[in-house]
Amino acid sequence: MPTRLTALDSSFLHLEDNGAHMHVAAVMTFEGVAPAYDDLVEAIEARLHLVPRYRQRLAFVPLGQGRPRWVDDPHFNARYHIRHTALPAPASDEELKRLAARVFGQRLDRSKPLWEIWLVESIDSTRFAILSKTHHALVDGVSGVDIVSILFDPMRDPAPPAPPSAPWLPRPVPTQTELLAEALLERSTVPAEALRGVRKLTRAPRQVAERLAGGVAGLGSMALAGLSPAPRSSLNVDIGPHRRYTWVDADLRRFKAIKSSLGGTVNDVVLTAVSLALGRWMRGRGEDTDGLVLRAMVPVSVRAEAQEGALGNRVATMWAPLPVGVEDPVAAFDEVHRAMRGLKESGQAVGAETLTQLADFAPPTIMSQAARLQARQRFFNLVVTNVPGPQFELFLLGHRMLGLYPVVPLALKQALGIAIMSYNGRLGFGLLADFDALADLEDIAEHLEGAIDDLARVADADDRAGRTGPRRTPTPVAT
């Protein structure tokens, strides 16, 4: 397991600035009364040997002469990372959302392993919740699915996990001098890696040339599509450290029926629903959307099957147009579908992967400035990420997971992020927003429900899926 952060992983550290927090997160709800805190700690500690990075912290190279590396935390204490709280009775999803927003608005402590798990008791006396929070430098959304599959069980009464082969003993933490010397040595060996690449070129010139040509074409597509400024919008304003959070729960069968009827992919349906919802929300605020096409940054996984379960980030980027000015659901779907098909054919994702690979050879100080520069540019209006999750029930200490709602972090000038994850036939939309900029976040969620309903209606998807409507707990009316 490599200990040096990749350039992409390191960039997520540099992006944390002025209220931006670069952790991915999730809200998970479970049936029944919450387990005892000690039982939860014991269960997680029994499996930490399967994810050794969770007991490691960052070590920073002096003078910025190298990217940080992972080292064992000699003072690791699972109870610091596994928190315990309860909602005041009577509680509902609304109180859970407010708690989640507060937790997700707090930056992780970089002097310790970059993760937290919160056990939340007492949601309407029939459910409890788990809030998870992991820094983006540690894990991306796709590998995070693998980690969840490790920490939770696919059956209610599983066999106990196999114990580690030996007790965990932290390796000595390198000194500042050792960190600097190691980084300088690695930098001096980069030419040797380049020579290995030259030898490979002479052995298989045709295959390498074809791959290089594909990467160059993809880079050109990225330059045309992603390096021009995104249109101005009310979503792109200065953000603070505080957050709002809500979710929408939908039926995955419904989305599959829509895409089968209209001809496209589930991701096309997701992006169309988001586009319709944002357009309605903007017009409701009196904003002009005529001809407006927002740009969404859509992370896509480039993780090979052999890399499933590995930590770190294997993601590339596509810039997806959101035609918020198109009000007709079918017309909006057609436009999104054509655009996404064109982006895939252009090799834009290949170009993004090429950039992340090239970035591994950039000096750390240049990478730091590049990451900060990227955060201040209007290349996109918001992030919309759709991650496939486990399509089977998961259990925690015998309690069935009911809902899974993900979180994508906000970058500077990005007041809204929408993360979608499928789980056991459901689609959970997690909407994270800046507290001050989007006081009407619930309106966006309601418009999203309406957009899904409209797409299902024009596609006759409810008859195909055998059910109706997204599922979402109504907001209580104050008296």
Image (cartoon, rainbow, N blue to C red):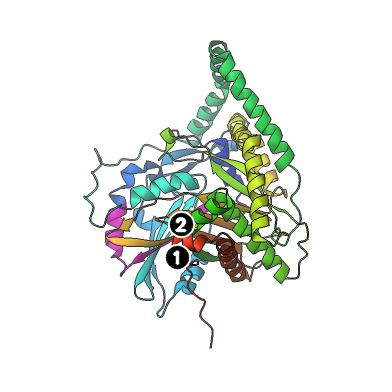
- Say which residue label 1 marks: 467
Badge 2 or badge 1: first in the primary sequence: 2
Q: Position of residue 137 (x, y in %)?
A: 52, 44
Q: Is residue 308 above or below residue 181?
A: below
Left or right placement of residue 323 versus residue 354 in this view: right
Question: Few, some or many C-alpha atoms within 10 Å of disc 1 (few <14, some 14-19, many ≥20)?
Answer: few
Residue 334 at least partly seen: yes
Q: Residue at x 39, y 68 (%)?
A: 85
Judging from the image, what secondary structure is the residue with disc 2 in? Answer: helix
Amino acid on which the number 2 mark rests in the picture:
Arg
Q: Residue furthest top?
A: 202
Closer to the camera in the image, 321 or 358: 321
Q: Which residues are magenta?
A: 17-44
State the separation of the CA atoms marked 2 and 1.
9 Å
Residue 103 at least partly seen: no
Amino acid on which the number 1 mark rests in the picture:
Arg
Position of the N terminus, as image quadrant, is top left
Q: Residue at x 42, y 56 (%)?
A: 425
Q: Position of residue 221 (x, y in %)?
A: 70, 36
Judging from the image, what secondary structure is the residue with disc 1 in? Answer: loop
Question: Few, some or many C-alpha atoms within 10 Å of disc 2 (few <14, some 14-19, many ≥20)?
Answer: some
Q: Residue furthest bottom?
A: 479
Residue 108 located within the stretch drawn in magenta: no
Closer to the camera in the image, 425 or 367: 425
Q: Position of residue 20 (x, y in %)?
A: 61, 55
Q: How many marks?
A: 2
Q: Is there a contact, CB below 8 Å, between mark 2 and mark 1? A: yes
Closer to the camera in the image, 55 or 330: 330
Q: Residue at x 47, y 59 (%)?
A: 464
- Say which residue label 2 marks: 253
Residue 22 located within the stretch drawn in magenta: yes
Q: Position of residue 304 (x, y in %)?
A: 47, 34
